[in-house]
Amino acid sequence: MTQNLDLTDIQGNIIKAYGAYNYQKARYLFLRIDKGDKGRKFVGAITTKVTSAVPWEKSSKDTDSAVKPQATTNIAFTFAGLKALELPMASLRGFPEDFIMGMAKRKDILGDDGPSDPQNWDNIWKEEVHAWISINGQSIDAVIKRYDWVLEQIKASDGGVTLLTGHRGENGEDDLPYQDASVLYDATGTPTPKEHFGYTDGIGDPVFEGQINVSARVLGRGKLTREGNWEPLATGEFLLGHVDEAMEYPQTAPAPWLLALNGTYMVYRKLHENIGTFNRFLEEQSKHFPGSKEMLAAKFAGRWRDNGAPIVNAPDDESKERWDKQYAEADEAGRKKMLTDFTYNQDITGAKCPYSAHIRRINPRGSLEYGVKDAYDTPGALVNRRRILRRGLPYGEVKDATRDDGNHGIIFMALNVDIQRQFEFIQQQWINYANDFKEGNDKEVLLGNHDANNPGKVVLQVEPGSGKPPHFVSKIPRLVETRGGDYFFIPSITALKLIAAGMVDPT
Amino acid sequence: MATKSGNATALTVLSPIKNGTMGETSYADMTRERCLRLPIHEKSPLSKVPNTYLARLFILDDVFYESLPANDAVFNFSDIWSFFSDSARKKSLPRRDHLKSKYLVFSSNFYGDLDDYLTGLWDKWSYTDHDGNQRDIRYIWEHCVAFDRVTDCAGFIQYIKRCQLDASLFFNGSTDDSLQEQLKALYLKQEFTKFAVAHQGKSAIEIQQAFKAFIARVQPDNLSSPSWFPGQSTP
């Protein structure tokens, strides 16, 4: 029997990437809970407006659906936050070590060193953060309206909670009370799925059992079967209280069952993008590269910047033209398939899509078998336990594309049931190290924590027997820097009500 | 017997530590502290012992209790325990073994033959401890049973061989060459990568000339220099 999720109980940001539903603006707030009882009352007030995962109605005749709101609201807590809300010790003790420690203390695992070191983060991360509230809006007005409502609730908490300040902003501020984020717009004012380096983002998010309309979206986004088909990943990779890819309930769930069920963990990271450095680096490297600058940029990400074409199916400028033509002629379903439905089976050497490319590192699909037939139970057996749901939006604007010091980057959120096994593993082993890809310690080009004193390189392989030399990309600078973040628990709506009522009972 | 795999030897040594104490500290704890306080990386005494691929020293305090066996083929014996008397039930539990003394464990994977390696261990192992004293290999084994009878290299080799166990697990990160050859190969590989990156796209003549200069600099036939040093931790 297929999994039926209780969508009314699950917070909406877990199931939906709001950006894909025309929510172009977002605001993230961070709070400290000063008094347990008043804090719980505040959580109860916010819970009344928390957005669930119920599908939004397509017509007024839809009965099992909700009206799509102008703004959404979601809430999550750090371990310190749950302690401040006075959860019972027996419940607190059940949380996993990574979550208890929080992101700053995991810096050695995450490679947050040098400019990414917590001492260089936004001021807000220099104090204890307890809660995260996100507002996604179809317009900035809708965001502000909901933000004002949250401020009223904070005021009504009568000293129970404090809105924390200390975000860096657009005009040199370092004490803002919120982090704004927004899709980027093209010259005509049309929203785009781009981030500041110019890449098309958020194409291949995992699809798991119980999501809506799975069969239409699973191609290239679920798990690869031995027969070469795609199936949705197990729910328990992304939601606590459900069976995971190892046919077990996730071990990271706190007690009682109701506190954990339908909840998950979120990694929040503010990632600053060094725009000037990136543009100079790309320009400089493309002088020696046997191909266009755009082709080289595509080698870094595994997708072409303009439309997200996977480079494995459009490996050079010529084949990209053919791909574009086919893409232009395809219908919507055909386009989606072209963007997501691919493997690296015909590219075991990485000659088309380098092993150092972003999308091959974060989701190697079946390619960790290295062409060895039946090396594992299924081609993606090593990958299926390392998937993350990616949420978030770009922030800031690029006012001067030659400089690094503006306010521009990505608010990145990774959702998974086991931070250590999923997000941290990808960051440590696949982004900042490459033993699994037989590339020694070559870091991923875009996100790797490249060391200014000992800059890295990657090798762009060529087809064996082609007579061409492989191409080296060298002196890779730090292109992305961490500016803050933490680990959060996103409870179900039932769990939120239990927390608010002080009724979490692990006995 | 030392176990060989190609030119590599795996050595596992368990030397019993004297029971008893000196003041309020047991000989085992004193030995453990000496192991824990050994300098590491370049300063490790092991970096001076020729041909050590990987080695470790630790104290074995006791054996682990193995608990109840897993499922039997037909049924779990423990499921029907309640039918038996208490004494019968207790008799069916796994035996709990204990060691009569604690052991100093030395395990090493190295290149070449055991006698040569142990000679190197006796002759070359030296370091300055945290109190500024010069220490040789006898300092680590000092409190082991009957080690006071070891007075020379031949005696040390004999002692170690009497404490030796069969070993068959090998360090995987190693080839079959001497340590010096492996370090030189690693050095050459890294330098050659830098060379390839630095001369990418240049003409054949330029590359050939640069390569001659490169070879003159890295001296592939000279194993001792330039190269990585044993235990070296930073470039």
Image (tube, coloured by chain):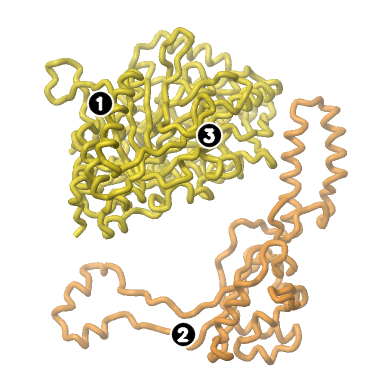
Looking at the picture, which amino acid does disc 3 mark? Ile
Please report, as a chain letter, where disc 2 is located: B
Residue at point 27%, 53% (across, down):
A86
Q: Which residue is mark 1?
A: A213
Answer above or below: position of A206 versus B48. Answer: above
Q: Which chain is yellow?
A: A
Q: Secondary structure at mark 2?
A: loop
Residue A348 is marked as 3
**Residues at marks 1 and 3 touching, judged by CB atoms closer than 8 Å:** no
Quote the CA–CA distance across marks 3 and 2: 52 Å
Q: Where does residue B59 sit, x and y in percent of width and height?
A: 54, 77
Please report, as a chain letter, where disc 3 is located: A
Query: Viewed as shown, does residue B4 lie left or right of B181?
Result: left
Q: Closest to the observer: B100 or B211?
A: B100
Residue A226 is marked as none
Q: Where does residue B43 sit, x and y in percent of width and height?
A: 72, 65
Residue at point 74%, 29% (across, down):
B200
Q: Where does residue A264 sit, x and y in percent of width and height?
A: 31, 43
Q: Which residue is mark 2?
A: B99
